Image: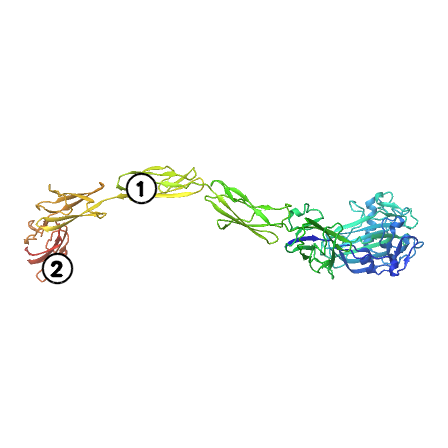
């Protein structure tokens, strides 16, 4: 859906028609008239108010003769043709409807704020007169809601005091007191406006601000704003040019205006202020935010709003909006009119757009939806200048209507780009004129993965890729396109040595060969901190050497090779067969992988040799020997195992000893050889243990279990358990005599 937002000023209310159409009484001596028969509400709503304001709580102080509705002022040379007249005398007398005062209002109450303003003028203009009172008071007040960000109105001040009583105590005065949100002033205001009021009637560009009186604007002071009257139909000696009162306000807030005029000191030679018809307003500035194609509106900053619509392309929307909500009791009405010069019509070329509508109370705007039907006529573009009219307020937008364009597009069939580069791939829309398309959306995918929503994509790859794009225009028509992103590329290949078998302590070269891909290459070894292609290796254990190579296209390849280390571990097994005869064998780690993988050479340590795996050898039993075997694999890896060979267990124990401390045979001492583990127990004749030891070198001195008591003479039974280095434990028994 296309949206066309626009903001309008508030409509002016209907102005009064000629008074005679309503049978109203007028006082007239020439073409100008002053109608004094209207209600106070009509003076405000039908005469004074213009665009963008709504008035409530209207009140008036003074005689009804002090207010009137001027028409035809320019017919007699007055600068304002029509407007609201407020006077310190009879409002009609200013245009010679009567003679003299004609209805002086001296009995009206005074106004302290007007008196203060009158007496503020002398020091500002270098004078010293004093106004003693304000008489013939005429005050019109009302609340209003502004639709814009300022309030303004045009006015003319005139007086019969001119040319004789300037700079005197007869300084007639008027003021426009404004109060409301954001205003803080020195003058009184109703209780609902705590910020008080300011006077917005002053000499233009005066600093400090100078109120307008006969003494502050005349032929000698601020003469550019003064007109000396020469028209006999105008019964004022002089008057100002058309001046504008303007002040900032806040849209949506409520404000109060007090329009007041009175005679200074006396009650004669009256003054008037004429407020131009329909000029009291708060216009809404024309602003908008376009959501249509930017090409449709070449200058969005100006007041002309241009939008686009297409035949048979779904709904479009115009939004009529205000800067603040409609705060009155009645909606904000407006009409839609095709302006002269339009090539299209509202009735025939747009469907669903009403000729009139209204912004509801409390709302900021209203959206109106329409469609442009397909007429099947090749007419190019048509322009509809659409006026949005509310009262005297007009805003205009331009809608350009296009024939529904063909929805066609192309993309390259093949895009060839080296893998280390990228390329931009774009969709070319076939369109004429260039901005005649509603917005087109794009949905890219590359190799099935979403890849953006722009008209162009930038892409680079290692391998060729399928590019697909789905298009949809503002008319919800769809297109599908595809192309190939082609990457010419030689496959990256790595070569390393075959798996290798080494003996422990040997070395070999690890060499990497690279072909294909896109140089330069990045070489990343798991085992080395450099990028060299050749390394001399001597692993102690079997090791897998791994490498990753990344080329300039970010393509990577992995390679590895295994270097197995053959480490031989030999262990000798021997078994005593008795009589110094031993059976030998050898355990090899790893176990023999196949028959004939290992070679054996035995050296028994006594000058004898053997070459089988499990020989039997007989020793002389006279000594300890060291047997050795050399184990060799078929690739020359070797290990040496050594084992000590010991004889049988032998020990000697006396049959008697005499622990009498004579230095001879005082302890039971045991001697032996080839003993690895030993333990002795000695018992008395009643089977009680008197001695125990595991130390072969420890002698028994005849004590009882290591105490201070000594065993008596007698026969003692002993038990010995002993094992040799090559024999299992054996038990021996015997007796020993203890004699003292």
Give the label, 2 or 1, closer to the camera. Answer: 1
How would you rate the neighbour count of disc 2 (Cα within 10 Å): few for under 14, some for 14-19, many for 20 or more? Answer: some
Q: Which one is in front, 683 or 650?
A: 650
Q: Quadrant of the C terminus?
A: bottom left
Q: Disc 2 on helix, strand or loop?
A: strand
Q: Kindly identify which numbered label has been placed on residue 308.
A: none
How would you rate the neighbour count of disc 1 (Cα within 10 Å): few for under 14, some for 14-19, many for 20 or more? Answer: few
Furthest residue to the front?
377
Furthest residue to the right?
99
**Circle 1 is placed at which residue position?**
498
Q: Which one is in front, 326 or 150?
A: 326
Real-space Cα separation, disc 2 to disc 1, in angstroms? 73 Å
Residue 283, given in percent of the width and then of the height, sits at 75, 52
404 with respect to 98 (left or right): left
On screen, 167 above or below 717? above
| Sequence-first disc among 2 and 1 | 1
* Occupied quadrant, residue 601: top left
Residue 197, given in percent of the width and then of the height, sits at 76, 54
**Circle 2 is placed at which residue position?**
689
Q: Which one is in front, 46 or 691?
A: 46
Q: Which one is in front, 44 or 82?
A: 82
594 with respect to 89 (left or right): left
Residue 261, given in percent of the width and then of the height, sits at 84, 54
* Occupied quadrant, residue 555: top left
Could you tell me if residue 219 is visible in this image? yes
Name the residue located 8 percent from the left edge and 61 percent from the top edge. 685
Residue 288, given in percent of the width and then of the height, sits at 68, 51
Could you tell me if residue 289 is visible in this image? no
The reply to whether discs 2 and 1 touch (Cβ–Cβ < 8 Å) is no
Q: Quadrant of the N terminus?
A: bottom right
Q: Disc 1 on helix, strand or loop?
A: loop
């Amino acid at each position: 859906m296309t949206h066309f937002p626009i903001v309008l000023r508030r409509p002016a209310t209907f102005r009064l028609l000629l008074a005679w159409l309503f049978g109203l009484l007028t006082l007239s001596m020439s073409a100008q008239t002053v109608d004094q028969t209207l209600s106070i509400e009509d003076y405000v709503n039908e005469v004074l108010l213009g665009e963008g304001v709504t008035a409530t709580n209207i009140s008036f102080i003074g005689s009804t003769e002090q207010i009137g509705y001027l028409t035809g002022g320019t017919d007699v040379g007055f600068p304002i043709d029509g407007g609201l007249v407020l006077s310190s005398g009879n409002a009609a007398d200013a245009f010679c409807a009567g003679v003299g005062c004609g209805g002086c209002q001296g009995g009206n109450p005074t106004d302290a704020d007007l008196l203060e303003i009158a007496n503020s003028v002398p020091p500002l203009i270098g004078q010293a007169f004093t106004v003693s009172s304000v008489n013939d008071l005429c005050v019109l007040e009302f609340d209003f809601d502004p639709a814009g960000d300022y309030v303004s109105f045009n006015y003319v001040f005139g007086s019969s005091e001119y040319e004789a009583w300037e700079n005197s105590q007869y300084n007639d005065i008027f003021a426009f007191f404004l109060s409301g949100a954001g205003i803080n002033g020195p003058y009184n205001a109703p209780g609902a406006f705590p910020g008080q009021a300011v006077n917005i009637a002053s000499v233009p560009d005066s600093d400090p601000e100078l109120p307008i009186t006969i003494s502050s604007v005349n032929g000698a002071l601020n003469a550019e704003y003064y007109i000396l009257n020469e028209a006999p139909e105008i019964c004022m000696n002089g008057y100002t040019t058309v001046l504008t009162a303007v002040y900032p306000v806040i849209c949506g807030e409520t404000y109060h205006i007090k329009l007041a005029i009175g005679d200074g000191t006396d009650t004669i030679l009256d003054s008037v202020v004429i407020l131009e018809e329909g000029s009291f307003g708060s216009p809404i500035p024309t602003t908008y935010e376009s959501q249509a194609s930017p090409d449709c509106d070449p200058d969005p900053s100006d007041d002309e709003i241009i939008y686009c619509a297409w035949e048979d392309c779904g709904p479009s929307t115009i939004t009529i909006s205000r800067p603040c909500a409609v705060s009155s009791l009645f909606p904000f009405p407006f009409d839609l009119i095709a302006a002269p010069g339009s090539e299209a019509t509202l009735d025939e070329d747009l469907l669903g757009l009403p000729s009139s509508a209204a912004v509801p109370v409390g709302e900021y705007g209203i959206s109106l939806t329409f469609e442009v039907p397909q007429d099947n006529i090749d007419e190019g573009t048509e322009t509809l200048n659409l006026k949005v009219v509310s009262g005297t307020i007009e805003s205009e937008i331009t809608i350009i209507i296009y024939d529904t364009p063909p929805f066609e597009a192309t993309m390259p069939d093949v895009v060839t780009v080296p893998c280390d580069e990228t390329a931009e791939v774009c969709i070319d829309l076939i369109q004429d004129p260039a901005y005649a398309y509603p917005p087109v959306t794009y949905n890219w995918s590359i190799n099935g993965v979403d890849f953006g929503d722009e008209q162009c994509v930038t892409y680079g790859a290692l391998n060729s890729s399928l590019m697909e794009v789905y298009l949809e225009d503002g008319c919800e028509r769809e297109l599908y396109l595809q192309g190939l992103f082609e990457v010419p590329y030689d496959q990256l290949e790595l070569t390393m040595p075959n798996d290798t078998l080494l003996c422990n302590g040997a070395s070999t070269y690890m060499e990497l060969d690279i072909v294909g891909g896109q140089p330069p290459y990045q070489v990343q070894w798991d085992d080395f901190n450099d990028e060299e292609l050749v390394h001399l290796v001597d692993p102690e254990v079997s090791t897998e050497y791994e490498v990753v190579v990344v080329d300039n296209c970010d393509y990577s390849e992995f390679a590895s090779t295994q270097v197995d280390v053959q480490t031989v571990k030999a262990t000798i097994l021997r078994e005593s067969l008795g009589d110094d005869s031993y059976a030998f064998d050898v355990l090899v780690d790893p176990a023999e992988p196949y028959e004939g993988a290992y070679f054996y050479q035995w050296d028994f340590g006594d000058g004898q040799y053997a070459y089988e795996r499990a020989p039997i050898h007989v020793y002389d039993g006279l000594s300890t020997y060291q047997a050795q075997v050399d184990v060799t694999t078929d690739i020359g890896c070797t290990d040496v195992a050594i084992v000590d060979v010991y004889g049988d267990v032998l020990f000697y124990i006396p049959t008697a000893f005499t622990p009498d401390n004579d230095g001879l045979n005082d302890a039971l001492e045991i001697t032996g050889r080839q003993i690895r583990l030993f333990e002795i127990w000695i018992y008395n004749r009643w089977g009680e243990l008197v001695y125990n030891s595991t130390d072969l070198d420890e002698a028994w001195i005849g004590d009882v279990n290591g105490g201070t008591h000594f065993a008596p003479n007698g026969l003692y039974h002993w038990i010995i358990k002993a094992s040799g280095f090559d024999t299992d434990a054996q038990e021996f028994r015997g007796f020993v005599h203890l004699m003292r």
